[in-house]
Image: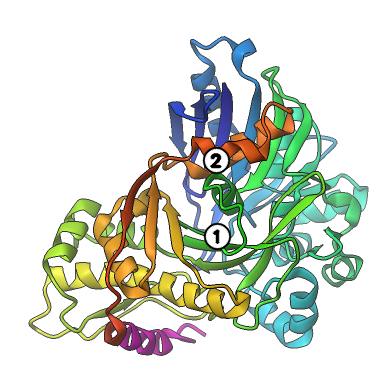
């Protein structure tokens, strides 16, 4: 058996898998979302660690620990924790990937160093990534300044923080390192020029290790041997091992990743180049596009009292067209390919005839169209025609969404029976890390639940939606 720790944006889960990577047991704990100012998002790292302890111990109850081979971590990426390595003290709340507090600094960097940063990191300069969050802490938080002066400051993304708490090792893997805006995707190491630019000492950053490999023994006596960012974990868990394979995780946001093989390709259209995984001598790169708001859009509409449940939205979207209504889910700005932190959510085209059903349909279409836009750009940048979109995440349970996505893209959508692909990827990597399985043997564990193959359409609706996106931009500057 294996344990996957899936540390997400709104909750932490531990999942127990059998030796065939089937889910046996799940434990989940939510934690607070902290919003100190408009556009700022934080988490309490001690609270996160408390949820990790709680869910792992619940999984271990009634189980013989000796029968558990390894632990794999997968995590929300870009979110940064700062701590004092000597005292163990958390120096500030974790600054979450959604946080926009460094928007102005990012705009300045984009103008002065955008091309250089993109060339080295494969990323677009944006508050989304970790570097400006670290820089902000060092400039604004007294405890972080003092720890830097003493040489006891340690930075890490969530995987690094959890690995330190579990094993005492200060490490991260290549997939998470590639999300910091400090990592050179060709050299596969921290970049000295970028460290100098952000004034981040190399010694404050973790050592970079493979996605599969033993990090050390944990406080539970089980080796930690797999570490991977959540979206790359899903790419691996979907067994997207061929060049041109694409997976889409639909959760809080939607994340589209394409396996582009063993060499980096830099996007000319606002996509990101990232490490898919590293196992020994094998390095796989991916192109990525991010829609920041997906499930969060549905949650927001429900919180307003507009709908009672996701099921109501799905039912009404099945029964209605959009009635000329278009919705842009830019509640925290726009991600790829626009990268506009000043964009804001927009609903346009309403009249007195507009119904809840029209808005439900516009909601589903906005998610599908956001993904379609990314897939089209991905095909252009990579030169590869996508034949299948492998989906996962809680929002992918919506049949109407997958039908609309298949209709708008003209591409077959494939949903797996095991929807826990992110954690599955982490435990598969952990099993490889302890030498129990070979990557080449994993294909036999994949089971497809359902395919959606719709005739292509909705071209006019997509063009109208793109016009709405233009109108949402640069709103909150």
Question: Gap in Å between the C-alphas at discs 1 and 2?
Answer: 14 Å
- Tag 2 secondary structure: helix
- Asked if the magenta segment contains residue 49, the reply would be no
Q: Who's the residue at 7% across and 82% down the image?
A: 353
Q: Which residue is mark 2?
A: 443
Name the image quarter holding the N terminus: top right
- Tag 1 secondary structure: loop
> From the viewer's perspective, is 144 left or right of 420?
right
Look at the picture and state if 62 lies above or below 393: above
> From the viewer's perspective, is 409 left or right of 280?
left
Q: Who's the residue at 21% across and 58% down the image?
A: 314
Of residue 233 and residue 169, the one placed in the foreground of this image is 233
Q: How are the colours assigned in the image?
A: rainbow
Q: Position of residue 410 (x, y in %)?
A: 35, 72
Q: Position of residue 315 (x, y in %)?
A: 15, 58
Q: Which residue is mark 1?
A: 245
Q: Position of residue 156 (x, y in %)?
A: 74, 49
Look at the picture and state if 437 lies above or below 398: above
Whether residue 56 appears in this view of the structure is yes
> From the viewer's perspective, is 314 left or right of 330?
left
**The magenta segment:** 462-477
Of residue 375 and residue 89, the one placed in the foreground of this image is 375
């Amino acid at each position: 058996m294996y344990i996957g720790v899936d540390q997400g944006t709104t909750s932490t889960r531990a999942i127990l898998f059998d030796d065939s990577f089937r889910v046996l047991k799940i434990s989940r704990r939510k934690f607070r979302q902290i919003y100190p100012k408009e556009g700022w998002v934080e988490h309490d790292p001690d609270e996160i660690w408390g949820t990790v302890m709680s869910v792992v111990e619940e999984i271990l109850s009634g189980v013989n620990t000796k029968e558990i081979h390894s632990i794999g971590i997968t995590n929300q990426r870009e979110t940064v924790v700062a701590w004092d390595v000597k005292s163990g003290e958390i120096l500030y709340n974790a600054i979450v990937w959604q946080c926009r507090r460094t928007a102005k600094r990012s705009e300045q960097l984009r103008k002065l160093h955008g091309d250089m940063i993109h060339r080295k990191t494969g990323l677009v300069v944006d508050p989304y990534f970790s570097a400006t969050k670290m820089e902000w802490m060092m400039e604004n938080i007294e405890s972080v300044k003092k720890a830097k002066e003493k040489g006891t400051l340690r930075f890490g993304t969530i995987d690094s923080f959890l690995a330190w708490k579990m094993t005492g090792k200060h490490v991260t893997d290549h997939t998470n390192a590639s999300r910091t805006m400090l990592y050179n995707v060709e050299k596969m190491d921290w970049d000295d020029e970028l460290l100098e630019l952000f004034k981040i000492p190399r010694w404050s950053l973790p050592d970079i290790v493979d996605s599969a490999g033993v990090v050390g023994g944990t406080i539970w006596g089980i080796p930690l041997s797999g570490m991977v960012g959540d979206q790359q974990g899903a790419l691996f868990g979907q067994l997207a091992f061929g060049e041109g394979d694409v997976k889409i995780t639909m959760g809080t946001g939607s994340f589209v990743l394409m396996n582009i093989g063993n060499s980096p390709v830099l996007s000319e259209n606002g996509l990101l180049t990232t490490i898919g995984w590293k196992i020994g001598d094998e390095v796989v790169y991916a192109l990525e596009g991010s829609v920041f708001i997906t499930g969060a859009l549905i949650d927001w509409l429900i919180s307003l009292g507009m709908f009672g449940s996701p099921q109501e939205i799905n039912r009404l979207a099945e029964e209605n067209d959009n009635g000329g209504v278009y919705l842009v889910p830019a509640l925290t700005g726009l991600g790829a390919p626009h990268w506009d932190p000043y964009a804001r959510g927009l609903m346009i085209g309403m009249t007195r005839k507009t119904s809840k059903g029209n808005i439900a349909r516009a909601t589903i279409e906005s998610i599908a169209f956001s993904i379609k836009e990314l897939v089209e750009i991905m095909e252009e940048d990579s030169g590869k025609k996508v034949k299948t979109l492998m989906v996962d995440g809680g929002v992918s349970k919506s049949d109407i969404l997958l039908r609309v996505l298949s209709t708008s893209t003209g591409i077959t959508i494939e949903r797996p029976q095991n929807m826990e692909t992110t954690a599955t990827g982490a435990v598969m990597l952990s099993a490889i890390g302890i030498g129990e399985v070979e990557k080449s043997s994993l294909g036999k564990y994949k089971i497809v639940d359902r395919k959606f193959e719709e005739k292509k359409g909705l071209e006019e609706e997509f063009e109208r939606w793109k016009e709405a996106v233009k109108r949402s931009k640069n709103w909150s500057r």
